Amino acid sequence: MSLRRIILIVLASLLVIAGLLLYLNRDKIVYVGSIKLVEIDCANAPEILDSVYVSDQRIRQGGVPFAEFARQDHKNQELVISILEKCGMPTLDEATREQLNAIWLVIQHTRRKYREKYFPLIEEGYKNGLFSSNQYATMKDRILMDRGEPQLYGSQIKNGQLYKLDSPAKVNERREKMGMEPLEVYLRRFNTDFDPDG
């Protein structure tokens, strides 16, 4: 058998296997497209954020088919990003804590480029009392992990392990300043250990 024929057989086999895997996982594959700005009436932003918060919590509590999860998450991202673009970050006079949490949750769970773009708004919001120190620290760690840099507060777990830390021996000092529990306590939820010296 010629080398060319062997290569063709291998390629055909790989295509069949790939097709079979796609077919078996068809319920887990959903293309939702890119984020597009949608028409927003800023006067309705609080009600929109209420619905975003409710749907975000519902889909993350489990039992929602993956396709529905992906579509709803995408819709929430479009709504929140459209509000931020058209109306700006709401103040405490314009939004409840739950509505602000909706913004934080959506930005935390969106794609890296949107986290990077809107993190300055989250950071400014934290300084102005819109977001908690825990929310700020968690998103800051996520941004650092996105960039491949060590995290500061130890909030990010990757592949079942604590993502790399900047100055591990000082992480609990940083966490305490942010009102966060010791890292060892936090990591128990993930069955992960922390050795500040290792």
Image: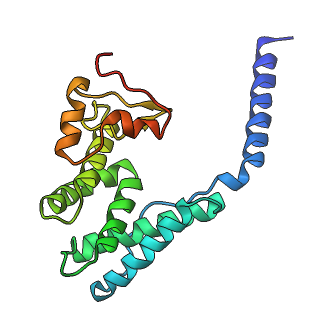
Residue at position x 72%, y 48% in the image = 25
Q: Percent x, y for residue 119?
A: 24, 54
Count of marks placed on residues: 0
Q: Percent x, y for residue 94?
A: 22, 81
Furthest-left residue in this view = 128
In the image, residue 170 sits, relative to residue 146, either above or below, namely: above
In the image, residue 168 sits, relative to residue 22, either above or below, namely: above
Q: Quadrant of residue 158?
A: top left
* Residue 110 visible to the viewer: no
Residue at position x 18%, y 81% in the image = 93
Could you say which is closer to the camera, residue 90 or residue 137? 137
Could you say which is closer to the camera, residue 43 or residue 164? 164
| Left or right: 66 as drawn, with respect to 23 | left
In the image, residue 57 sits, relative to residue 48, either above or below, namely: above
Q: Percent x, y for residue 34?
A: 45, 60
Where the N terminus falls, by quadrant?
A: top right
Residue at position x 29%, y 16% in the image = 197
* Residue 18 visible to the viewer: yes
Could you say which is closer to the camera, residue 154 or residue 56? 154
Q: Percent x, y for residue 157?
A: 42, 36
Residue at position x 39%, y 80% in the image = 48
